[in-house]
């Protein structure tokens, strides 16, 4: 009985999960498109089914994050943020991160606590305008991950929406060159 079980196990293919490295995508052979929504590719003896929309959306999302410049709109009168003293310190220590996200914050060390930080300019990109709520969200993120580059969730949502709308749609027939391009892009992402 045990011999039959071992013999059957030896005949069955290994269906364990595999890890794909970034460089594996460049080595994949594109076989074609299935149901105008999936790219079928092969690497060695393994077949891969890639969702063309999801692959292209992820690539576009990362490209937007790298290339989009957040514009700033100066406020006529800087807005007092009325932060607690510990949050004012977080702002002071992370001014560059706020600036990278398009927020211009002014710190007056001579002002009394809770009155030291003013919002002088807000970021915007196309029709998305940010505000003090995004500053507060960034403060929470920076308390959890000090010194790390963080973004307000609305920035990520804006990029995700733009990437989704511009990605290859399900139902779009792709040429072999377009399929190759999508698969190659998968090997370039973080």
Image (spheres, rainbow, N blue to C red):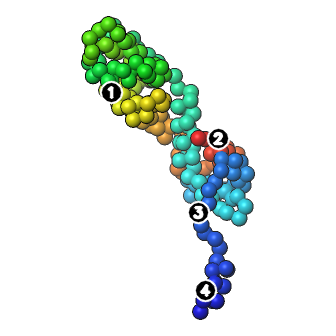
Label 4 secondary element: helix
Residue 110 relative to residue 65: left or right: left
Mark 1 vs mark 3: which is more N-terminal?
3
Mark 4 — residue? 5
Point out which mark residue 188 bears. Answer: 2
Mark 3 — residue? 17
Mark 4 vs mark 3: which is more N-terminal?
4
Give how far across and how far down residue 86 sits, in percent: 32, 24
Residue 147 relative to residue 119: left or right: right
Label 1 secondary element: helix
Distance in Å between CA atoms under marks 4 and 3: 22 Å
Distance in Å between CA atoms under marks 2 and 3: 22 Å
| Image quarter of the C terminus | top right
Distance in Å between CA atoms under marks 1 and 3: 42 Å
Give how far across and how far down residue 177 sits, in percent: 70, 45
Distance in Å between CA atoms under marks 4 and 2: 43 Å
Residue 109 relative to residue 1: left or right: left
Mark 1 — residue? 136
């Amino acid at each position: 009985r045990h011999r039959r079980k071992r013999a059957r196990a030896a005949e069955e293919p290994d269906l364990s999960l595999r890890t794909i490295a970034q460089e594996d995508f460049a080595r994949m052979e594109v076989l074609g498109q299935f149901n105008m929504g999936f790219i079928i590719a092969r690497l060695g003896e393994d077949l891969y089914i890639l969702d063309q929309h999801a692959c292209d959306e992820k690539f576009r999302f990362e490209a937007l994050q790298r290339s989009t410049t957040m514009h700033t709109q100066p406020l006529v009168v800087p807005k007092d943020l009325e932060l607690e003293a510990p949050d004012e310190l977080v702002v002071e220590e992370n001014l560059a991160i706020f600036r990278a996200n398009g927020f211009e914050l002014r710190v007056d060390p001579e002002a009394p606590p809770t009155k030291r930080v003013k919002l002088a300019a807000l970021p915007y990109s196309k029709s998305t305008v940010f505000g003090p709520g995004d500053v507060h969200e960034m403060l929470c993120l920076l308390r959890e991950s000090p010194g790390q580059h963080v973004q307000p969730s609305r920035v990520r949502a804006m990029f995700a929406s733009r990437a989704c709308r511009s990605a290859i749609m399900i139902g779009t027939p792709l040429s072999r060159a377009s399929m190759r391009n999508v698969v190659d892009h998968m090997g370039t992402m973080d």
